[in-house]
Image (cartoon, rainbow, N blue to C red):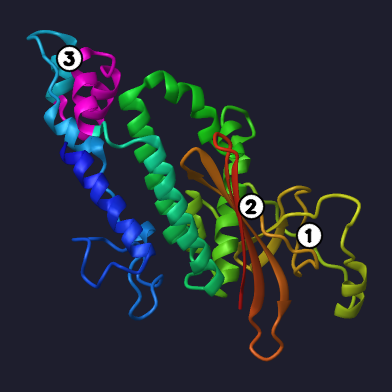
Amino acid sequence: MIAAAIMQQHLRQAVARSAGALGPGAGGARRVLSTTTNLPGQQPTVAQVRKMRCTEILMDRYQPEVREGSEELSLMSRGGRAQKRFQFGSMTKSFRAKSLVTRSVKDYTEQAFIAETQLVFQEFNAALATGAFVDMRDVATEFMQERLQRNMDYDSLVDTSRLSRIVSFLEPPELLQARTVSMHQQVRDLVFAQYTVRYVTENRRVSSSELSRATGGSSRRGVPRPKKMNQFTAAQRRRTDRPNTTREPARWAVAFDEKGEYYYNTVTKQTRWDRPSNFLISPTYALCENGTLGATGRVLSEDPETGLDKVQVDVVFERPLFNLSVPWRVAFF
């Protein structure tokens, strides 16, 4: 009942906040995911309020019977939350675990979860329209991963067979191909794509050492060296870089080496020093609850006075189970 009461309290606060009825300081303790998200005097959104997972309370209260000399005793003696979570999840079919879950989360229904998620999407859409934040990985990605984990915990506690039926919908296309040989190259492409999104939105250079730490090694791993450029003028280069209208636009990512940055085509594996005219950032996917959050950026133009790029970022959230698709589009200046 404690977990159910806490979840109901968060739901009531979320509805009151959307209607403007929640005053300053209400809602108890909250942790803001990003200090750059809120404008001065703006209240934290629903996405920035950390929800308490029902699994934390249930794991502390549920202690399975351990017989001396059995295999379970050695597992429990090592301790650690990972071992406890594994053991608790493997015994959810027992009558004792199911009865405890029923008493704790009987008021937390799937309809309430969908209603709360829809409210969060509205706040995210309003924030994107006003340009309240630009770092999508800091707020949206962390929030979606938190909600996905909570939804998976809820489904695994109530019905483990239901989680196995929808697990394929919870993975983006990149993770579905994780069992193939080409997974390593796709992971590197996603890493470069994520740094490209942050590079064009924040308009700053990512150092080679920082990129090397993110990729777990050399910043040039898996990316060929750029070929030598032909000696022709910039005007000739612009005339030759005509957009390809016969097929899907090429997807480019920014890579770095000791000589500087260059552009790497994740489709054709082509490299070049100058920025192509059809520069399209490789898509970045984030796990959501029962869906996928994808972000694709495109450089629209460059301000001649400030030298800053105008970037258009398309964000699409898809939920296959509920036939819901929420597209977002925002241009950063």
Give amino acid for label 2: Pro
Residue 332: x and y, percent? Answer: 60, 73
Residue 194: x and y, percent? Answer: 56, 56
Residue at 65% from the left image edge and 71% from the top image edge: 311
Occupied quadrant, residue 105: top left
Magenta span dominant secondary structure: helix
**Which quarter of the figure is the N terminus placed in?**
top left
The Cα atoms of the two marked residues, 2 and 3, are separated by 44 Å
Give above or below for 182 relative to 312: above
Residue at 37% from the left image edge and 46% from the top image edge: 146
Residue at 72% from the left image edge and 60% from the top image edge: 280
With 289 as the anchor, is 129 left or right in this view?
right
Does the magenta portion include 34? no
Disc on the earlier residue, 1 or 2? 1
Give above or below for 90 relative to 312: above
Closer to the camera, 197 or 330? 330
With 329 as the anchor, is 29 left or right in this view?
left
Numbered tag placed on residue 72 in the rendering:
3
Mark 3 or 1: in front is 3
Numbered tag placed on residue 227 in the rendering:
1
Residue 320: x and y, percent? Answer: 58, 36
- Element type at mark 1: loop
Disc on the earlier residue, 3 or 1? 3
Closer to the camera, 296 or 106? 106
Residue at 26% from the left image edge and 46% from the top image edge: 8
With 157 as the anchor, is 228 left or right in this view?
right
- Element type at mark 3: helix
Q: List the residue tagged with mark 2.
A: 283
Disc on the earlier residue, 2 or 3? 3
Residue 16: x and y, percent? Answer: 32, 61
Give amino acid for label 1: Lys
The Cα atoms of the two marked residues, 3 and 1, are separated by 59 Å
